[in-house]
Image (spheres, grey):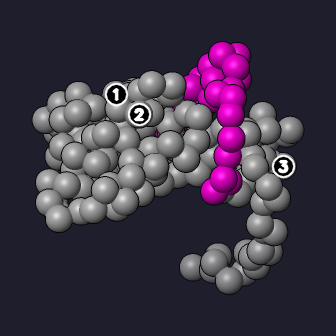
């Protein structure tokens, strides 16, 4: 798929299935992330690849965080929280490692991590892999951050859920460029 087709046709795949994409496909996805705009070449991000048994551990972290916030969660509610980590055969967590810098603001570094994440979504789509970017309360919960081994200056920018698209994707709504672009 050429770059413009990928950019114009990418959409989130809310439902995906296994298997985990092969290693060549994943390397293409990660290599795309490494080309994100990055002022000062700080590489203010890293990625956690979560698959197989690690998905169960991620689900357990989600439950621990949810129970911490609400000890009255029923077993059924806990299983619902746990299942969120199991929605895809692969979860890639984008971790921002932004740090104070004399020339490059933290915000710009975090935007770079977001750009790397978007590059992974596009590379996945270009190779027929479905993906969706999710955050939610688990992305910012200290129990999840500690459990994933994040440092003091690190935070989760995204959980990318990836696999092979299941079912049909929703039709893309055509947007008018003129509605969003103005001459100044």
Q: Residue furthest bottom?
A: 179
Q: How far apart are the two marked residues, 3 and 1, measured between alpha carbons?
A: 30 Å
Within 10 Å of the Cα at label 2, are there few (<14), some (14-19), or many (20+) other Cα atoms? some
Residue depicted at 68% across the width and 41% down the height: 17
Q: Secondary structure at mark 1?
A: loop
Quadrant in the picture for the N terminus:
top right
Q: Which residues are magenta?
A: 13-39
Q: Can residue 130 be found in the magenta stretch?
A: no
Of mark 2 and mark 3, the one earlier in the sequence is 3
Picture quadrant where residue 154 is located: top left
Residue under label 3: 5
Q: Secondary structure at mark 2?
A: helix
For residue 27, side relative to residue 154 (left or right): right
Q: Residue furthest top?
A: 23
Asked whether the viewer can see residue 169, the reply is yes
Image location of residue 39, percent across then percent down: 40, 36
Residue under label 2: 56
Of mark 2 and mark 1, the one earlier in the sequence is 1
Asked if disc 2 and disc 3 are in contact, CB closer than 8 Å, the reply is: no
Residue depicted at 52% across the width and 51% down the height: 133
Picture mark count: 3
> Which numbered tag is attached to residue 42?
1
Indicate which label's residue lies in the foreground, 2 or 3: 2
Vertical comparison of 129 with 11: above or below: above
Vertical comparison of 125 with 11: above or below: above
**Residue nearest the viewer, comparing 170 with 58:** 58
Q: How far apart are the two marked residues, 2 and 1, measured between alpha carbons?
A: 33 Å
For residue 101, side relative to residue 74 (left or right): left
Image location of residue 34, percent across then percent down: 52, 27
Picture quadrant where residue 57 is located: top left
């Amino acid at each position: 798929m050429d770059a413009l087709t990928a950019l114009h046709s990418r959409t989130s795949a809310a439902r995906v299935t296994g298997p985990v994409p092969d290693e060549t496909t994943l390397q293409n996805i990660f290599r795309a992330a490494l080309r994100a705009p990055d002022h000062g070449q700080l590489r203010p991000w890293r990625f956690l690849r979560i698959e197989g048994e690690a998905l169960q551990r991620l689900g357990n972290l989600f439950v621990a965080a949810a129970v911490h916030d609400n000890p009255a969660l029923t077993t059924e509610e806990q299983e619902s929280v746990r299942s969120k980590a199991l929605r895809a055969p692969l979860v890639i967590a984008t971790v921002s490692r932004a740090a104070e810098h004399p020339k490059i603001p933290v915000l710009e570094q975090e935007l770079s991590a977001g750009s790397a994440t978007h590059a992974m979504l596009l590379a996945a789509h270009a190779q027929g892999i479905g993906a969706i970017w999710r955050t939610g309360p688990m992305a910012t919960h200290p129990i999840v951050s500690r459990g994933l081994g994040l440092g003091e200056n690190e935070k989760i920018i995204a959980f990318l859920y990836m696999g092979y698209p299941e079912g049909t994707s929703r039709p893309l709504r055509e947007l008018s460029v003129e509605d969003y672009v103005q001459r100044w």
